[in-house]
């Protein structure tokens, strides 16, 4: 390692630190190998992909598989759909979920426990249970093959997550803050918007990112409600693209890598928010 | 709600105003479908009766058909096997990771964060990636195993009925391990170091400290992670749907994928609903325990 400068304890502590770092490093290499594999496969040239022997380091690097995706009209449509469904469901979730979390955290209302129970229960519902009824209902309402249908369904999973994650944050805000806002002429609503939400910035960023990713990661709702491939997001069009590319794994992996990119970006820039939020909510769709 | 404070009705109304929109939304998007789904499972809804709007109640017929179908029992067995195997593997490894990353060292934070990527990325991509890595001929897993001389013949990871279920279990554990690690690390952080210090003073070795201090104190976190893990694993869909589509020969079909297949590939909506109700009832039993525990914590 030769970087002993960064270790600043007694020699015994330093040795322990180095050993633990090595173990963690090895775990990361093994555990994250699939991500590495996806990344390098996506930049391999065709001859490398179809060669009989596997290469763990690309023999030549090309960006063609990526360029191929971004110049493909069907891919761009799916990418747009993914983005819009994610933004749409995120907006619905935040607009409905944050005020609910505020009410559950700050107000003691009759029946509050039952309402909280409903949020906890809905968090556990399997998508399979909702699919058929929602499909039939959305079909009658004429909103199949739209952004609204998957966005609504995904939001029904994100809202309980937001309530459970943000409730503890709102609980910690002292009552006096709201009272002061009221004296300064705020009503309940403007105090909530202008004072309370900015106060829990960390939690707000967490739920914003995670509820976006819920929509971005969704497969089952988009696939079921949007039969029309032009309205499907990237996740739901995977089979279609696999048929198209067959064994051209570099193109398929580029497709997958683009889908993972927002998650990686979120982790690079917002890690502390996400880790903290996931811990509090412990929810994944 | 033991000590009910006197509430000014104005405040109560404000509270309801904040919570009611989302509460109504949840009732419409979850409560209504739940009831609708149960009703559907007692009717003969399929593509014909849906178009003509001529469905009728058939009592328990769908359930009778289901329970006399050997495929359903295979699917049930797969679901239980999948869930229990995943729980054991991801909990054990997740626990070891949690114990490791609970130690204070330079890389602990960043590496722990990186491991979470597998948990947060779309399951459909995990499935796509698995299909590539677990290919029989020239798949990277087989190549590595053969290079280390761990196997002579390539394993038919996804095409052999015996192996396919194990392969989806492995892929799902890759997603579940960070989740278990995260929740258990949080549990460990909650245990005060003073308890360990006094344990040391009392002469307990690290083995004793683990079994007599860490484990009992961690029990709530362990219970939570096992129950949540059960709920999320039992209702698996995305990963299996893209990885194997339930095949080969239903060998990886679980209740979630089977319900989907019945409803949206064969358009037997009512049969799909019946499977979904079975899935729901199984979750409900475990869910009750989880809720009892969570509500005890949440309500002060």
Image (cartoon, coloured by chain):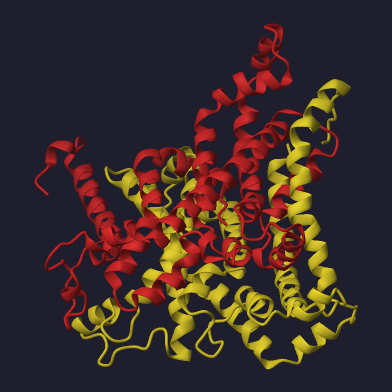
Of the chain colours in the picture, the one used for chain B is yellow
- Residue B75 in the image: above or below residue B130: below
Residue displayed at 36% across by 52% down: A261
**Farthest residue in the left direction?**
A2
Residue displayed at 65% across by 75% down: B264
Residue displayed at 51% across by 85% down: B247
Of the chain colours in the picture, the one used for chain A is red
The tally of labels here is: 0
Q: Quadrant of residue B158?
A: bottom left
Residue displayed at 37% across by 62% down: A256
**Whole-percent x and y of residue B148?**
20, 81
Q: Quadrant of residue A176?
A: top right
Question: In the image shown, does B123 or A80 lie closer to the viewer?
Answer: A80
**Whole-percent x and y of residue A168?**
62, 35
**Whole-percent x and y of residue A124?**
67, 58
Left or right of residue B94, residue B62 in this image:
right
- Residue B32 in the image: above or below residue B53: above
**Whole-percent x and y of residue A95?**
64, 36
Picture quarter with the N terminus of chain B: top right
Left or right of residue A251, residue B186 in this image:
right
Question: In the image shown, does B80 or B186 lie closer to the viewer?
Answer: B80
Q: Looking at the image, can residue A229 be seen? A: yes
Q: Looking at the image, can residue B184 be seen? A: no
Left or right of residue A199, residue B280 in this image:
right
Picture quarter with the C terminus of chain B: top right
Q: Quadrant of residue B284?
A: bottom right
**Farthest residue in the top direction?**
A184
């Amino acid at each position: 390692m030769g970087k002993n400068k960064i270790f600043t304890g007694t020699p015994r502590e330093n040795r322990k630190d180095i050993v633990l770092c090595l173990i963690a490093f090895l775990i990361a290499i093994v555990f994250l190998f699939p991500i590495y594999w996806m990344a390098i496969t996506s930049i391999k040239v065709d001859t490398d992909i179809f060669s009989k022997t596997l290469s763990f380091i690309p023999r030549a690097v090309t960006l063609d598989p990526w360029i191929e995706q971004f110049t493909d009209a069907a891919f761009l449509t799916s990418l747009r759909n993914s983005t819009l469904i994610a933004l749409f469901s995120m907006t619905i979730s935040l607009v409905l979920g944050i005020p609910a979390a505020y009410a559950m955290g700050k107000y003691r209302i009759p029946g509050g426990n039952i309402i909280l129970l409903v949020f906890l229960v809905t968090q556990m519902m399997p998508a399979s249970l909702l699919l058929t009824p929602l499909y039939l209902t959305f079909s009658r309402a004429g909103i199949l093959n739209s952004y609204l249908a998957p966005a609504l369904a995904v939001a029904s999973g994100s809202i309980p997550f937001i309530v459970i994650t943000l409730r503890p944050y709102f609980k910690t805000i002292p009552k006096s803050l709201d009272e002061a806002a009221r004296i300064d002429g705020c009503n309940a609503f403007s105090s909530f918007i202008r004072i309370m939400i900015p106060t829990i910035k960390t939690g707000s960023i967490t739920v914003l990112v995670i509820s976006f990713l819920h929509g971005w990661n969704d497969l089952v709702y988009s696939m079921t409600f949007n039969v029309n491939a032009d309205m499907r997001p990237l996740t739901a069009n995977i089979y279609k693209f696999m048929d198209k590319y067959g064994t051209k794994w570099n193109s398929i992996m580029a497709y997958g890598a683009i889908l993972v990119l927002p998650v990686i970006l979120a982790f690079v820039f917002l890690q502390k928010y996400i880790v903290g939020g996931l811990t509090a909510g412990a929810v994944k769709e | 709600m033991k000590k009910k404070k006197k509430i000014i009705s104005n405040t109560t109304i404000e509270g309801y105003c904040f919570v009611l929109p989302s509460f109504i939304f949840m009732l419409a998007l979850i409560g209504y479908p739940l009831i609708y789904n149960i009703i559907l499972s007692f009717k003969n809804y399929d593509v014909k009766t849906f178009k003509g709007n001529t469905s009728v109640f058939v009592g328990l017929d769908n359930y009778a058909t289901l329970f006399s179908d050997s495929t359903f029992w295979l699917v049930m067995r797969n679901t239980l096997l999948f869930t229990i195997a995943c729980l054991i593997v991801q909990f054990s490894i997740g626990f070891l990771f949690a114990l490791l990353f609970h130690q204070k060292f330079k890389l602990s934070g960043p590496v722990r964060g990186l491991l979470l990527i597998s948990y947060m990325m779309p399951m459909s991509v995990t499935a796509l990636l698995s299909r590539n890595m677990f290919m029989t001929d020239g798949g990277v897993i087989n190549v590595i195993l053969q290079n280390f001389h761990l196997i002579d013949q390539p394993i038919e990871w996804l095409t052999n009925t015996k192996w396919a279920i194990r392969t989806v279990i492995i892929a799902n554990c890759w997603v579940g391990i960070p989740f278990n690690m995260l929740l258990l690390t949080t549990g460990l952080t909650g245990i005060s170091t003073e308890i360990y210090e006094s344990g040391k003073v009392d002469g307990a070795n690290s083995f004793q400290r683990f079994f007599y201090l860490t484990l009992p104190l961690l029990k709530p976190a362990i219970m939570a992670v096992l129950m949540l893990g059960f709920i999320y694993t039992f209702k698996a869909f995305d990963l299996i749907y893209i990885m194997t589509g339930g095949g080969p020969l239903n060998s990886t079909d679980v209740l979630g994928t089977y319900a989907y297949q019945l409803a949206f590939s064969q358009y037997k909506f009512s049969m799909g609903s019946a499977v979904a109700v079975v899935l729901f009832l199984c979750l409900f039993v475990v869910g009750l325990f989880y809720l009892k525990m969570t509500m005890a914590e949440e309500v002060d």
